[in-house]
Amino acid sequence: MNLFLLAVGPAMVIIVYIYFKDKFEKEPWKLLLKNFMLGATLSVILAFFLSYLASIFLPELDNKSVFDMFLKAFILVALVEETSKYIIVRAAQNNKAFNEPFDGIVYAVFVSMGFATLENVLYVYNYGFSTGVLRAFTAVPAHATFAILMGYFMGKAKFSKHKILYNFTGLVVAVLFHGAYDFFLFLDYIPGIAIGAFISLFIGLLLSRKAMKKHQNNSVFKI
């Protein structure tokens, strides 16, 4: 039971935090739960499918090759996972409840936390308590950060004439930050290089905070 709470707890804390950051016009809980569950199910299925497609076109990767780890981080992991989440958030854009730019952040985070929760359960039950504690302060917040950055642009897209450009930008930014985070972690055979992952995460967190504040300040529901 303790392992289960450790596995799901970090994502629950994040979604509650984001829910209350949506200050002026909160989303229906049923819709949020639906998107969370889609993140934990459909996005995972999509990720497996996209990963299979990507593996067809990529050669067998060498874990000691910097270039191969670049391909793994940015294509097999970041592009695959963020695209699987993006597809679901893109569908959420069509819902009438998606009625202000901040909603892009909300839906992206709920989808991402669904994905991250399932991933975290698998990691914690396979590798134990210490892995769960580490991921609570690294991998899970990282997924939330990628989602906020994606959702910021997708929120802009909903109310812009340049919908395709903003949606695409959101996906690209999420992939870049996700890829950079994983790339440095994958190069664990190079002493000290993992610090790059935490630097990229820190930058992402700063940008995420600014993104949330900007959409809050520009809310059409702000009195």
Image (cartoon, rainbow, N blue to C red):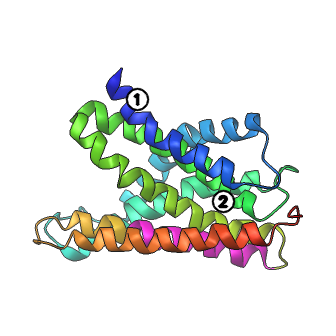
Q: Amino acid at mark 2?
A: Ile
Residue reaching furthest to the top: 1
Q: Amino acid at mark 1?
A: Leu
Quadrant for residue 161, please give it. Answer: bottom right
Vertical relation: 138 (above or below) 123: below
Q: Which quarter of the image is occupied by the C terminus?
A: bottom right
Label annotation for residue 105: 2
What is the x, y in percent for residue 165? 70, 78
Alpha carbons under labels 2 and 1: distance apart: 25 Å
Q: Is residue 167 magenta?
A: yes
- Badge 1: residue crowd in 10 Å (few <14, some 14–19, many ≥20): few
Which residue range is magenta in the image? 162-179
Q: Which residue is mark 1?
A: 5
Please report the residue visible at 19 percent of the width from the left and 73 percent of the height from the top.
193
Secondary structure under the numbered disc 2 in the rendered image = helix
Could you tell which of marks 2 and 1 lies nearer the N-terminus?
1
Vertical relation: 122 (above or below) 105: above
What is the x, y in percent for residue 118? 45, 37
Which marked residue is nearer to the observer: mark 2 or mark 1?
A: 1
Left or right: where 18 falls relative to 68: right
**Of 99 and 24, which appears nearest the observer?**
24
Please report the residue visible at 58 percent of the width from the left and 45 percent of the height from the top.
15
Quadrant for residue 4, please give it. Answer: top left
Q: Is residue 152 magenta?
A: no
**Of 188 and 80, which appears nearest the observer?**
188
What is the x, y in percent for residue 135? 33, 48
